[in-house]
Image (cartoon, helix red, strand yellow):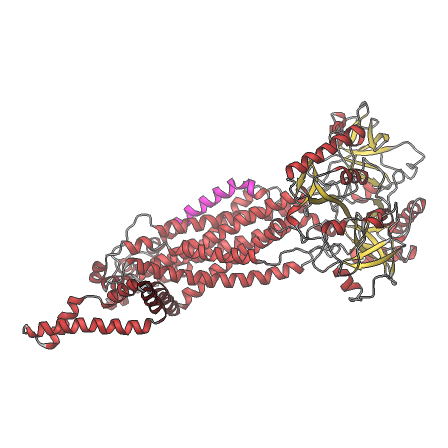
Amino acid sequence: MKSLDWFRIRIAALFQRSELNADLEEELRSHVEHRADDLERAGLPRAEAERRARIEFGAREKYKEECHEALGGNAVGTFLQDVRFSVRVLRKCPGFAVAAVLTLALAIGANAVVFAVLNGVILRPLNVPHADSLYGLEHSDDHMGQESYPNYLDLRDRSRGFESLVAWNISQAGIDTGGNSSRAWVAAASGNYFDALGIQPFIGRTFHAGDEHGLNSAPYIVLGYAYWHSHFQDDRSVPGRVIQINKHPFTVIGVAPPGFRGTLLFFNPDFYVPIVNQPQVNSEFDLNTRGVNWIFETMGHLRPGVTPGQATADLNSVASYLGKTYPVDDGGMQFILGRPSLYGDYLGKPMLGFLTALMTLSGLILLAACSNLGSLFAARAADRSRELALRLALGSSRNRILRQLLTEATLISLAGGAVGLLGSVAILRRLSVWQPFPQFPVQIPVDPDAKVYLVALALALISGLLFGIVPVRQVFNTNPYEIVKVGSAGVRGRGVTLRDVLLVLQIAICAVLITSSMVAVRGLARSMHSNFGFEPQNVMIADTGLGMAGYSGDRESAMQRRMIDAMKTIPGVQSAASINWAPLSGGANSWNVFTDEAKNLKPSSAAAGPYWYNISPDYFQAAGTTLLAGRTFTWQDDKNSPLVAVVNREFARKLFGSDKDAVGKHFQVALGADIKRIEVVGLVVDGKYQNLTEDQAPAVFVPLLQEPMSQTYLVVRSNGDPQQLATAMRGRLRDLDEGLPVNIQTWTQLMAAILFPARISTLALGILGMMGAMLSITGIFGMAAYSVSKRLKELGIRMALGAQRKEVLQAALGRPLKLLAFGSIAGLVLGILATKILAYIVYQATPRDPLVLAGVVLAMALVGLVATWVPAQRAISVDPLILLREE
């Protein structure tokens, strides 16, 4: 029964606070009246007796709080009181409140955006059922997932750690749905692809392993949902329709579900076909040769109870079997497991490094914002010292005052977090539909989920705690009686204060961010003017996949020459040629090569793995690549002539030990069981082939007529207008074949995907640098303005005694400017030491660049000038007569 009464009292304390307040007020008034009656009987007048009774009784509010606490109903009520009081205080200072909220909104929003990208491309698994058990197979030496089709079949049939292994790759194809032929992106997948991943069709059906009965036996298409929506207008009767892919008939059997975008993150294929029909989609793919890695990635779900380590051991036992059975093709092969979706470590590690570094810098932005607000809160606590002292004198506890200040900080942080989250959601929605490369079906999966919202909430609460606890020392060291008696917080010390430390930290962070942004700008400039090994200016590139128009064999070679000859007839064209993959276009072949003396042609014994390009005559002239020695190719270098090659200097150094006298020497290449001996007839300069940050790589150029390719780029150099040239090229190609799908652009535009990381890094770091500069300006401005406002009387006396403007400015702003100098130097040193972090973000990160150092010094000086301009104007415009008259 007693416990029930106690529970009722607690409930009443929580939900009947007004009644309890009335009862407590009546009880306290009764005590005061009884004491006044005693004093009146002792001879004091009634008014004096009541005054003395109230003084003796003390702070009534303190007793009321203690009574509520004893009843257990103080927590919720006190919290609501603190919230109401904090709202009133912030409403009285709208400028401070708005500035604080926007400061946190910028910082939290930036962190939310970066984390959402990190979550979308690294942390979040593929959008397939049971993604946690899905692993991709990678080679331990290069962390790539490429595998030949025969090897895939052996791995699928012999491995015991996976429920089922699937294989897939992506290429372009020409698709004709009844009108003109157009380009589309197709994923060629193993027959068990959809079943093993647990993907159910939206309409119709998917293909299955039972549909495969040999080469080109399953001419079926599963449309991607987005492609079905945009090209077939959501026509549910599309299953059963026959369309042309590279002039081959395929039957549409179904549509993939809307949430499924394939198994390569941020790349959405237009449709899917069985991999046994891959030769019809791309004739360059060879499904029979074991030593040629044509399958882009192999993946599968682990069996229940099988660990990744057990599955890896089982795969390596299969690899050992393949190495013994096919020593030339697969000797020394070893596997590791990785999470699929980002090309293994090829994109995974660079992307993780980039986003981690960006997350670190955005975290510095948040730390700078907290330092800024902490400094402002400390200044506000000093300004409110008299108010706090009066509250302490009236009986309020220091813990209660501190709790109220933390509540005020929490309200600001939550408001800032909400505004920042709203802004970040808007940015992320734009990013999720952004297509940076129109020719590629690229979409960034950064839709915010519960993790993003939780991170934003956590950042808001942590931020409020960080800058809210700054005034703690001031509150606990406050002497209320001294402040009430003196009327101010007393004389400020000249030692280093917490506000000074926070400001230096904030300025140092700003200097680091500005250093990073300037390094990014310099890196982008270098990337645009670095030595590529070719001259992309004044060159147009026409992507011509003859296989998409039904060409094959000798018809391809004849058509390629006709296209080159047609380009040369265009006025202003200086040279024209073809290459299977244009350097820095995002693709290239690579084969293992061996010295001429090598007898063991296993992959582990290869002398180099150069990039391999098939080119027509005049390519080096069209590309602007310098020939150092020997000769280039002619149209006589065909299948009936000896095999020849032109190599770069790095290839010559790796194969022959020196780039001198390389012409005339031979090397070997093994394509499965086919071993070729090739003579070097020319030497060209080194260049960039896959990306700008790669180490110098070997490269081989062979005649297109000796190794025909259906997928080629036309390289056309001209001194004319690019738009007019593109129109003329398109007209010439249409005259040759109206059904040939072609994409024409400048070589610089083709390199956009390669330059994209440098450009996006420059943009991101530039934004972070601007945010850091804004925070530093507000921090320095706040401190300078506060310093001037608190020393107006002193400055007026100095001017009355004859001080010059320079001396007044030095007295008023000397301390903020010293802190600016200290913080800038510290930030610059940290920026120089952060070269390794910056290297993950920008091309050739060199903070020690004199231009970067000079730019940082100039930028920080400009920040200081902007931040102190208004306080300086106020300091030198002080009228001492008015100040003294006011005193």
Q: What stretch of residues is rendered in magenta?
A: 819-837
For the point 76% across and 25% down, the residue is: 656
Q: Which of these two is toward me, 591 or 645?
A: 591
For the point 72% across and 32% down, the residue is: 317
Left or right: 528 with respect to 80?
right
Left or right: 594 with respect to 471?
right
Q: Which of these two is toward me, 719 or 110?
A: 110
Where, quadrant-wise, is the C terminus in this rendering?
Answer: bottom left
Q: Which of these two is toward me, 50 or 850?
A: 50
Image coordinates of residue 411 in percent, x first then y, are 42, 63
Where, quadrant-wise, is the N terminus in this rendering?
Answer: bottom left
Q: In the rendered view, tell whether residue 408 sits above or below residue 704.
A: below
- Numbered disc total: 0
Left or right: 219 with respect to 227?
right
Left or right: 394 with respect to 823?
left
Where residue 7 sits, quadrant-wise, is bottom left
Task: Farthest residue to the bottom: give it.
Answer: 46
For the point 64% across and 39% down, the residue is: 308
Does residue 550 show up magenta in the picture?
no
Residue 692 visible? The answer is: no
Q: Which of these two is toward me, 874 or 749?
A: 749
Main SS, magenta residues: helix
Image coordinates of residue 155 in percent, x first then y, are 76, 38
Task: Farthest residue to the front: give it.
Answer: 1
Residue 75 visible? The answer is: yes
Image coordinates of residue 283 in percent, x first then y, are 86, 46
Image coordinates of residue 570 in percent, x first then y, are 87, 53
Does residue 831 show up magenta in the picture?
yes
Q: In the rendered view, tell whether residue 27 sits above or below residue 162.
A: below
